[in-house]
Amino acid sequence: MEINTKKGFAPIVLLIITALLLLGGATVYLTQTDEIVSSNETISQDEKQVEVNSSTTTPTIDFAFELEKIKKELEEEREKRKELEGKVAQGTTKIVVQETQPSSSGISQELLKKIMARVVPVTCMGSKGKFKGSGTSQLVENNEMIVVTNFHVINVGPINSTVCTIHIPEPPNYTKGTLYTARRGKFSPYYPDVDVALLHISKKVAEESNLFEPFPLLGCSASQVNIGEKMIVLGYPSFGEDINTGENTLTVTDGTISGILPTQYGPRYKTSAKMDHGVSGGLAISTEHNCIIGVPTWGQYNYSVLQDYGVGEVLGQIQSWESIINYGEIF
């Protein structure tokens, strides 16, 4: 009997559950419908907003296109490189790498050779006798072919009775080469405080040598020359002569800027580089900055400034490039 009672109730329970599910389903459906309507209204409003703001929207970047473009450019570069490497391997193309070995002075050998070829021995004879010194060709651009030297080197008598000559130095020893006659030119009106002058060489001579090409260095500014910095002096000092023949070759001595002497015409530089008679009118180069310090001109010996250095240790003095340019009045 209990079993039958339970069987009688089963249909009733099933009907109740079905009715509840139908009511719940209706509720759920209604809720979803409301949400969809609300959502559609929101979308409609968003679409309107998009339409309003469409004019201010920035165009999108096609990253795929840009990436493909970069890949194509890289591939072209690879092809070019392969082609160049193939030519080099076949010997049809040469890649030249210029290597310059620095000398002990700090200037490359290549540059030093160019400078040494421009420093010439100068000899002048006149009523006051014979004087030997040094000079440098075409230190500045000039329409004429010039050699810069000290005035005291060429001041050996009246101009019309003075004969000066230069020798073109010949590498590798830079011995005296071909002899040429030089004509006296301008000198500083502030001599002896500014001791600089010009010699003029004929154009024909210049065409036969490379002495008169643009000089490979520029002048140092006063701020570039400091005590303790390294430098070299180039010229033809008497201590470089052959004791048997009297012949001389170019001499390069190195040292430092030992001190600075201010004058109303610009600084003079003291140097520990060895200097002697014959180097007057030569060249002083900064190996720290690769520029022209000036012209070796004086020597301090036995507490007196000498133009003829004499024999013995001399503390040389260099006439600054600044004083030559500003007060030389020769260019």
Image (tube, rainbow, N blue to C red):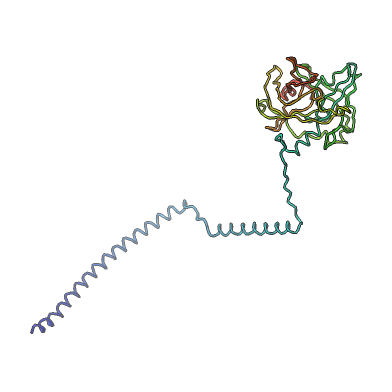
Which residue is drawn at the image coordinates 47% and 52% (left, top)?
Answer: 57
Q: Is residue 12 above or below residue 237?
A: below
Q: Does residue 324 show up?
A: yes
Q: Is residue 244 above or below residue 44?
A: above
Name the quadrant containing residue 223. top right
Image location of residue 236, percent across then percent down: 81, 27
**Residue 4 found in image quarter:** bottom left
Residue 125 or residue 41, whichever sits in front: 125
- Residue 30 horizontal/vertical position (percent): 26, 66
Q: Quadrant of the N terminus?
A: bottom left
Seen in the image, is 298 located left or right of residue 199?
A: left
Quarter containing the C terminus = top right
Residue 190 showing in the rendered view? no
Residue 92 sits above or below residue 305 on the image:
below
- As drawn, the residue found furthest toward the left would be 1
Looking at the image, residue 181 sits to the left or right of residue 24; the answer is right
Instruction: Tell which of 154 and 246 is nearer to you.
Output: 246
Task: Spot the residue most to the right.
Answer: 161
